[in-house]
Amino acid sequence: MLRECNEVVRRKVPASLPTLAYLLELGMVEIASESPDDFIEQASGIVAYEPDAYVLAEAMSVNPDWFITHDKAHFLKANPSSSLAFRIGTPGDLIQALEDEFTGKS
């Protein structure tokens, strides 16, 4: 997942790479080793597109609080988070949730 994130930022907004590194450090991001087969099987049952199923399996292996994405087709519209222990959303969704929590709106 991190490799994919890095490649996308490098391709689309390379000047943002230092900001990405800062945010990853600030967010105490965990790096998962290769996903166990059971997570890949579970993820494949949730997301049909194989590359995204692998990304989801990696997330499942570290059990994050949030999975942040802009992938509307496979993650946001499909809404697989109902069967997961973590929330899936955009960066804006996370910011809104944090704001709601901070202000007591949740």
Image: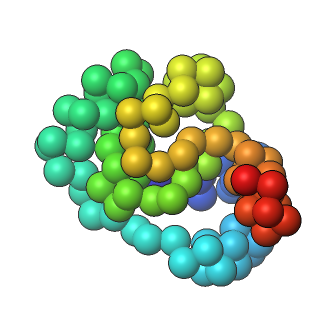
Q: Is residue 36 visible?
A: yes
Is 25 rendered above or below residue 11? Answer: below
Residue that sits furthest to the left in the current view: 37
Q: Is residue 95 visible?
A: no
Q: Which one is nearer the viewer's eye here, 105 or 65?
A: 105
Look at 70% across and 78% down and name the residue there. 22
Look at 40% across and 48% down and name the residue there. 85
Q: Return the x and y of residue 73 as percentages of the image width and height.
A: 59, 20
Q: How many marks?
A: 0
Q: Which one is nearer the viewer's eye here, 31 or 6?
A: 31
> Is residue 23 toward the left or the right of residue 66 in the image?
right
Look at 59% across and 58% down and name the residue there. 6
Q: Return the x and y of residue 92 as percentages of the image width and height.
A: 79, 48
Give the quadrant of residue 28.
bottom right
Is 57 rendered above or below residue 64? Answer: above
Look at 28% across and 23% down and name the residue there. 45
Which colouring convention does the figure follow?
Answer: rainbow
Q: Return the x and y of residue 14 as percentages of the image width and height.
A: 77, 59
Q: Which one is nearer the viewer's eye here, 3 or 49?
A: 49
Give the quadrant of residue 70.
top right
Q: Return the x and y of residue 16 as percentages of the image width and height.
A: 79, 64
Is 15 rendered above or below residue 8? Answer: below
